[in-house]
Image (spheres, rainbow, N blue to C red):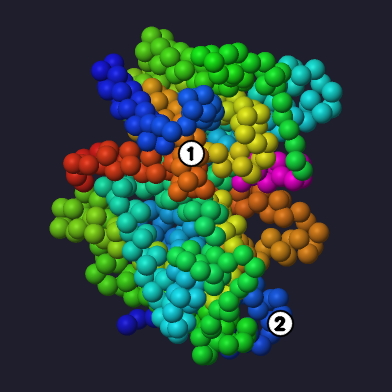
């Protein structure tokens, strides 16, 4: 298995982050970095679907909410270890993602994006109405005044340990996608991206591979949601609004969907930048203006986003030959 | 025409069944009240949906900044009223921001990505939405505000129900606009050119249709519709830029009900979505999730549309 140069840089940076980041960051920043990692997982899912298949998922943060909901629900209902909760949550998100995408899978392009927009709108309403389980009774598990504890993984009992844990999960997520990209499904996706007609003609099951991509992207979103739930112990419906899903996708395009670095940039812009601007005395609303302008700029002149431009600086060959 | 009658019967049947199922033990005027308020909200969805479809057919852009444009329009109108500008002038100026912003985007930015797929154009319009929403939230911080029209106070009594003129106005506007725009598309030269563009853009430009002019007109018309929708939503439901910006999601649901092409179907779908959403208030189970109705309906419409359809070699998006 060949390791590309950008891949090597990514692995080194990931190792450094896992080793050093939890030591350097303190207090509030540990939580911020952990949730940044969770959103990077979700951004990765949306990004690979957009870059490899041209499919737009505007419900990614909503799907994170499903992963988080299931993780919390299992945590308060059974005595399973965190890993089991996380994986079941991610798997259920993946299945649900595939089911929700079904109405539009036989249609192309725009309709697929629109159905995910409907899903995002619907999930926002469901989360707001039923809230997230906090250890209460019944199926929805919402109690009024108390909150049960969220069990964390053995290796991530402290905040620093959990950040490390989250980074490892994110790294595994990246590798999962990279593995897919280099196998039969990656080739099928590349063919579908080029031309659905050509893919059909060469016997690729277009619907199956599109559904699979949706499932994979849902899996990553579910993992992100579970990690977020593990970090915070409680989730709030306002985190998973439709507007957040839409904003995350916009930032995926800004960050650069083709590269691992794009997902990292996306998550940093999404989770860290507004807070930093606030600290510097810039109104957080202006961050939105900046993001919007960056999206327009990315669509018009920089299809590979910020990550593409950064990699372009270090490489003589055109960025799209390597990705 | 037969399609329209059939769909009308379908939507009306659906709404009647739901009204009977949920409201059979409620007094008739309570039921009527819910239907009237549902029709008003539904026509807002429909108005936005009509704007989206008119623009999409003529230019191939699904403008997801529709809600944001409406938010700017209503906030400007509100601000001008606060500054003491004569009310009708303030409304007109606010409304004018709709076509101005839409045309600015349509002429200034949209042509730079004319060659991209429709879904990329839709995503790009989100960028415009965020710019507008960011500016509006920056200029007007989160305070409770109220945008009022004199028509809120006036009311007429229809079949024993008191209906405010504003509600009548939006329902009538939605119906008249669908009839008017459909007639214009059918009868006028610009309408013909718009239909040609909707059918095949490359061939249209080859036979000498003035694409820029037709597109600009479509942008301005859709902007006007978005501005009006925003103004009316600010009056009838809530004056909050973020909420109005994401009003575009149910509007997209209404547009899907019309398969992104048929204006009468957008109108009927939008109205039905509003009424069903409002009727769900009567159900104990679904009361808390009633705004989900447009999304579920749109998903069902998409399912029906794709039934029996297969991926084929031919065709673009």
Could you tell me what secondary structure mostly forms the magenta stretch? helix
Highlighted range, magenta: B130-142
- Where residue A21 sits, quadrant-wise, is bottom right
Name the spot of residue B234 as percent of width and height, x first.
Answer: 65, 32
Classify mark 2: helix, strand or loop.
loop
How packed is label 1: few (under 14 Cα within 10 Å), some, or many (20 or more)?
A: some
Q: Separation of disc 1 and disc 2 at Cα?
A: 51 Å
In the displayed orientation, state which residue is furthest to the top: B187
How packed is label 2: few (under 14 Cα within 10 Å), some, or many (20 or more)?
A: few
Name the spot of residue B220 as percent of width and height, x first.
Answer: 56, 24
Label 1 belongs to which residue? B282
Q: Compared with residue A100, is residue A78 higher up or lower down, i.e. above or below?
A: below
Please, which chain is the residue tagged with disc 2 on? A
Is A246 part of what is drawn in magenta?
A: no
Q: Compared with residue A63, is residue A122 higher up or lower down, i.e. above or below?
A: above
Label 2 belongs to which residue? A26
Is B140 part of what is drawn in magenta?
A: yes
Q: What residue is at 54 percent from the left and 15 percent from the top? A: B160
Q: Which quadrant does the N terminus of chain A fall into?
A: bottom left
The answer, for residue A186, to whether it is visible in the render is yes
Classify mark 1: helix, strand or loop.
helix
């Amino acid at each position: 298995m060949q390791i590309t140069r950008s891949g090597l840089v990514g692995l080194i940076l990931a190792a450094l982050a896992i080793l050093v980041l939890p030591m350097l960051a303190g207090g509030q920043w540990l939580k911020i970095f952990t949730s940044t990692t969770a959103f990077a997982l979700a951004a990765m899912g949306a990004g690979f679907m957009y870059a490899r298949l041209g499919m737009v998922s505007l419900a990614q943060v909503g799907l994170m909410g499903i992963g988080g909901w299931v993780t919390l629900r299992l945590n308060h209902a059974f005595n399973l270890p965190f890993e089991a909760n996380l994986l079941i949550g991610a798997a259920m998100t993946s299945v649900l993602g595939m089911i929700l995408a079904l109405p539009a899978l036989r249609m192309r392009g725009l309709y697929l994006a629109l159905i995910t927009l409907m899903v995002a709108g619907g999930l926002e309403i469901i989360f707001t109405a039923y809230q997230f389980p906090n250890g209460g009774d019944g199926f929805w598990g919402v109690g009024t005044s108390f909150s049960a504890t969220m069990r964390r993984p053995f290796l991530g009992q402290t905040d620093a340990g959990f950040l490390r844990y989250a980074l490892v999960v994110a790294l595994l997520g990246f590798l999962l996608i990279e593995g897919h990209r280099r196998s039969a499904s990656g080739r099928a996706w590349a063919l579908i991206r080029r031309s659905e007609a050509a893919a059909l003609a060469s016997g690729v099951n277009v619907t199956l591979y599109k559904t699979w991509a949706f499932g994979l992207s849902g899996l990553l979103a579910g993992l992100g949601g579970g990690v977020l739930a593990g970090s915070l112990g409680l989730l709030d419906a306002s985190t998973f609004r439709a507007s957040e899903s839409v904003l995350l996708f916009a930032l995926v395009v800004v960050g650069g969907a083709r590269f691992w670095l794009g997902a990292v940039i996306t998550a940093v812009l999404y989770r860290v930048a507004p807070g930093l601007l606030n600290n510097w005395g810039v109104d957080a609303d202006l961050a939105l203006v900046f993001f919007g302008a960056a999206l327009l700029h990315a669509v018009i002149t920089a299809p590979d986003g910020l990550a593409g431009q950064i990699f372009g600086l270090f490489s003589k060959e055109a960025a799209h030959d390597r990705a | 025409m037969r399609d329209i009658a059939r769909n009308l019967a379908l939507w009306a049947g659906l709404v009647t069944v739901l009204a009977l199922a949920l409201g059979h033990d409620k007094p008739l005027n309570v039921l009527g009240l819910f239907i009237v308020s549902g029709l008003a909200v539904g026509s807002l969805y429909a108005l936005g949906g009509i704007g989206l479809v008119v623009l999409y057919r003529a230019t191939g852009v699904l403008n997801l900044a529709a809600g944001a444009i409406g938010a700017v329009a209503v906030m400007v109108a509100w601000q001008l009223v606060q500054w003491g500008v004569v009310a009708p002038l303030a409304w007109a100026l606010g409304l004018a921001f709709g076509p101005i912003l839409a045309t600015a985007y349509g002429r200034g930015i949209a042509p730079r990505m004319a060659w991209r797929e429709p879904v990329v154009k839709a995503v790009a319009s989100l960028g415009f939405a965020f710019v507008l929403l960011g500016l509006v939230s920056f200029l007007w911080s989160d305070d409770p505000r109220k945008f009022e029209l004199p028509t809120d106070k006036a009311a007429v009594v229809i079949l024993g129900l008191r209906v405010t003129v504003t509600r009548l106005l939006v329902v009538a506007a939605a119906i008249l606009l669908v009839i008017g725009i459909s007639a214009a598309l059918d009868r006028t030269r610009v309408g013909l050119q718009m239909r040609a563009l909707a059918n095949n853009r490359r061939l249209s430009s080859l036979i000498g249709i003035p694409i820029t002019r037709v597109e600009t007109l479509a942008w301005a018309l859709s902007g006007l519709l978005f501005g009006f929708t925003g103004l009316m939503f600010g009056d009838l439901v809530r004056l909050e830029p973020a909420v109005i910006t994401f009003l575009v999601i149910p509007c997209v649901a209404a547009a899907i009900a019309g398969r992104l092409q048929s204006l009468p179907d957008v109108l009927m779908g939008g109205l039905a979505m509003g009424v069903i959403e409002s009727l769900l208030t009567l159900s104990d189970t679904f009361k808390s999730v009633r705004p989900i109705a447009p999304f579920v309906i749109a998903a069902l419409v998409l399912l029906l549309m794709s039934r029996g359809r297969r991926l084929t070699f031919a065709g673009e998006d």
